[in-house]
Image (tube, rainbow, N blue to C red):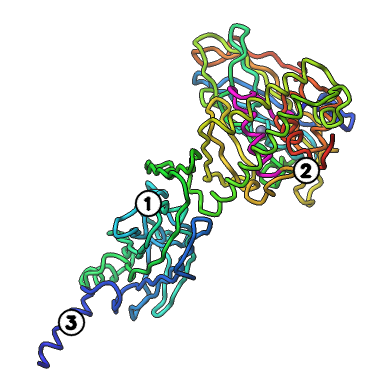
Amino acid sequence: MSNAVQGGQTSQQLQLHCSTSAGSEAWQLQVQIQNKDTTPWLILRWHSPLDAWFSEFLHISQNGQKLQYQGAKAKRGEPAEEDLLLLAPGATHTEWLDLTQAYQLAMVPALVQFSPIAVMPHKAGQALRWQSDQQQQLLCPELRLLPTGGAPQPSSPQTGQR
Amino acid sequence: MKHAHYLLGTLLVAGLFSTQALADGIRASLTLSKTNFTSAEDIKVQVTLTNEEAVPVRVLKWYTPAEGVEEALFKVSVNGVETDYLGAHYKRPAAQQKDYIQLKSGQSVSYEVELSSLYDLSKTGQYEISYHAESYTLFTNNPGQDKKLARLGITGISSAPVSFYLEAKQGSITTTAKPGDGGGTTVNGVTFTGRCSNTQQTSILAGLAAAKTMSADAKNYLTSYSSPSSSVRYKTWFGNYDAGRWSTVRGNFNNIDSALNTQPLTFDCSCKKSYFAYVYPTQPYKVYLCNAFWTAPTSGTDSKGGTIVHELSHFNVVAGTDDLAYGHSAAKSLAISNPAQAVQNADSHEYFAENTPAQN
Ligand SMILES: [Zn+2]
């Protein structure tokens, strides 16, 4: 995950879009991945919101202090079909996260930052197979959450860079 | 005399002698491949269910091994004392049509069931097992049939007992059956939960022995290697030599080695995911083993021993590592591009410990 992006394309040119928003309940949030491309994409579930809670894919801080992750960490081999999500052209995938499943949050605002999500272009009709040399990174915008639920202000459009 | 015989015949038909000669309903029979087992072996019993009715019978799957054993379907005793069922008890919605299997008149179905993951077989002795499934809903959902079976007095499926002798593990063994967690068996300080079969327990112990060997080797290497700055083995997995990072890794292996040898370890076999294993870093010293673990070699690259080293390194009280790069080639790249992250990466520790192919 920490390796440099291979393939040369940055997320700004990606035709995938990640958006994040606060849920109405405290410490719940929504992540949406939208495929604006004309071709399908594969999303590697590992270390992404599609992997809750088998890896640490969030960086959450309160009062500037990083919270300890209390979910699981898994050792994996090569990505199998079940580790991939195929996102068709025009499709949107939505994940709901309940942060209390993996973090102990105090009753103060929290800043939630996301690890880049590994994605790969896919040719329709081909086998679902992960090729790390074609891997690119999808960035999701960070999010501020209030202990009462919701976000402090309407989130401004973000480029996904951080 | 004639009269008396006739009465006896009626009793048999009524199913009051429900073990062997049951002439109605579903007959169960058990077959064992042998009668002497050691605790290193799985204990497989073949269950055959036969419809002895003249009409088709529908049986609730939950009380058969059709989709694995999901209820206490057997009575198991050792030296005459009943043993605990360690498997699942499911809370279920009402049975539906799809939850039943149909057996035609005279039709048989057979299933193989592994018993050591389901029942407490930790004691040495003569075991006796019989099939015994009973439920009010076992045969219902069969228009006309339930009334008939009720009239015949058949509420369950039973078999005659079969028996075998089991030579259990040496050493101190305690068993605590807690509903829900699949119970737990502790052998010489190592606890198994989540229905670990005998062969699984044996391969975990072999993996644990390999983990101890490789972590001791890693610890000794990092403590006494004569010229750290020229260590190819270190450089491959943790990057350019740096005294501070070397001592971080040495501290990590001291802790891994100490945890392996002095802490109460628990291994859980309930995971069915494709992973090797996972842990909760805040919950030492329980390791959940998944599908890839069972096919891994005992030692060498991505082995059982190495996986155990990897998982122990995650515990915050041990080394608090992360998963920053998986696999040999990504871990090697990480060592070159970011040595500070490499010394935080779990697979880097595993590969250093596995040292395959061996480097000096
Ligand atoms: Zn890991």
Mark closer to the observer (1, 2) = 1
Q: Could you say which quadrant of the image residue A113 lies in?
A: top right
| Residue at the image point whose x is 75% and y is 20% from the top | A160
Magenta stretch holds residue A147: no
The C terminus of chain A sits in image quarter = top right
Along the line of sight, the residue nearer the viewer: B190 or A98: B190
Span shown in magenta: B303-324
Which residue position is annotated with label 1?
B85
| Residue at the image point whose x is 9% and y is 92% from the top | B1
What's the chain of the residue with tag 3?
Answer: B
Which residue position is annotated with label 3?
B10
B183 relative to B96, above or below:
above
* Ligand 1 located in image quadrant: top right
At which x and y percent is residue B257? Answer: 63, 30
Secondary element under disc 2, as helix, strand or loop, is: loop
Which residue position is annotated with label 2?
A130
Q: Could you say which quadrant of the image residue B303 lies in?
A: top right
Number of numbered tags placed on the structure image: 3
Residue type marked 3: Thr
Are tags 1 and 3 found on a single chain? yes
Are tags 3 and 2 found on a single chain? no
Magenta stretch holds residue B320: yes
> Alpha-carbon distance for marks 3 and 2?
67 Å
At which x and y percent is residue B324? Answer: 73, 28
Q: Is residue B198 left or right of residue B336?
A: left
Say whether mark 2 is within 8 Å of ligand 1: no
